[in-house]
Image: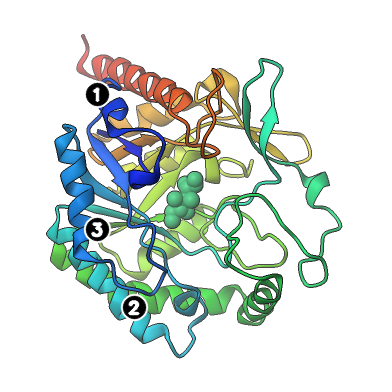
Amino acid sequence: MKLSFRWYGETDPIPLQYIRQIPGMHSVVSAVYDVKPGQVWPEESIAKLKALSEANGLVFDVVESIPVSEDIKLGTDKRDEHIEVYCENIRRCAKYGVKCVTYNFMPVFDWTRTQLDKMAPDGSTSLVMYWDQLKGLDPLKDDIHLPGWDASYTQDEVRSLIQAYGELGAEGLWKNIEIFLKRVIPVAEECGVVMAVHPDDPPYPIFGLPRVVTCEENLDRYLSIVDSPANSLCLCTGSLGCAKSNDIPAMVRKYAEKKRIGFMHMRNVLILPDGSFEEQGHQSFCGSLDMYEIVKALVDNDFDGWVRPDHGRMIWGETGKAGYGLYDRALGATYINGLFEACEKAKRGN
Ligand code: DNO
């Protein structure tokens, strides 16, 4: 596996010099964050990410994300133009050495949480989603400002998007996924890029918005639309793992065996009795997921894709982008290194 770390570019308060000091760190996971979905990424910006990474002894070979525009997801009359731009962005990234591109197909919002700084008894803070904070909210009537939601939409825009997705429904969304994959995956293949779809977080409908990248049955369907290693998963343990019905170690084993995991996002979540969840430290004893079994499933199948420690808590007084501080993600990285070392040694029998 290749250990990687997400970096938000030059505005990220965490310098690449610090990231390179995490033992075993190989890749920088980044993107051109100042261009809107549906627009072409300037080559200079991609070249700069590569140069900065290399100047720090790291490789820029994973993009997270090239966002899929709402026009593509909804299939509006701008879809074709946006898919063209999407393909061009893949080509440009590949030209600068990118080998894996992460993206998602979540309508309107990326991940959903109700609080980004819930304090645990030890004084650390983390992201949580509590159902009782969501209950009773009607996105078509109420003004909703959940933390982390795209602030560039007005409440009216959010309402009309929610309405449009309501009319589209899950099968309509599948149709648009198919159109996207059938045009984009051949380009990725040509460029030697693996497309890694990030699951919906959390993996069930929110506010009636269809969400389909959620469970084994749907992941099978997604991968079979274009049966190519370039059509792969970004298997995010914490996103899929907040639905109890998803058996994460078994899913990792299955898709690693089929060589359809391009990228692993590793973090733990604690599922509460009412289905709410709290992000926790990466270690198995901190949450509901058995991280050892997950790594063992990867090692047993000679996984050679990218792994990154996903969201960390805020610890040791650090402030910054929720989920993306340095300290706890670095602890996560060393834990992941340890699990891989143990599983690899056991597999070799020494
Ligand atoms: C959350 C991330 C996601 C991910 C996108 C990929 O912190 O894991 O936002 O980057 O869903 O498109």
Describe residue 222's horizontal placement relative to residue 97 as left or right. right
Q: For this rendering, which residue is in front, 152 or 340?
A: 152
Residue tagged by mark 2?
A: 83
Marks 1 and 2, how far apart at CA: 36 Å
Return the disc, 3 or 2, that comes first in the chain's sequence. Answer: 3
The residue under the point 13% across, 60% down is 95
How many neighbours does mark 1 have within 10 angstroms: few (below 14), some (14-19), or many (20 or more)?
Answer: few
Q: Provide the secondary structure element on which disc 3 rests.
A: helix
Q: How far apart are marks 1 and 3 (CA)?
A: 26 Å
Q: Report the colour scheme.
A: rainbow
Q: Are marks 1 and 2 in contact (CB under 8 Å)?
A: no
Residue at numbered disc 1: 24
Q: Mark 3 points at which residue?
A: 45
Instruction: Find residue 206 and report its horizontal and vertical position in percent.
Output: 69, 59
Give the quadrant of the C terminus.
Answer: top left
Relative to residue 112, is residue 15 depicted above or below?
above
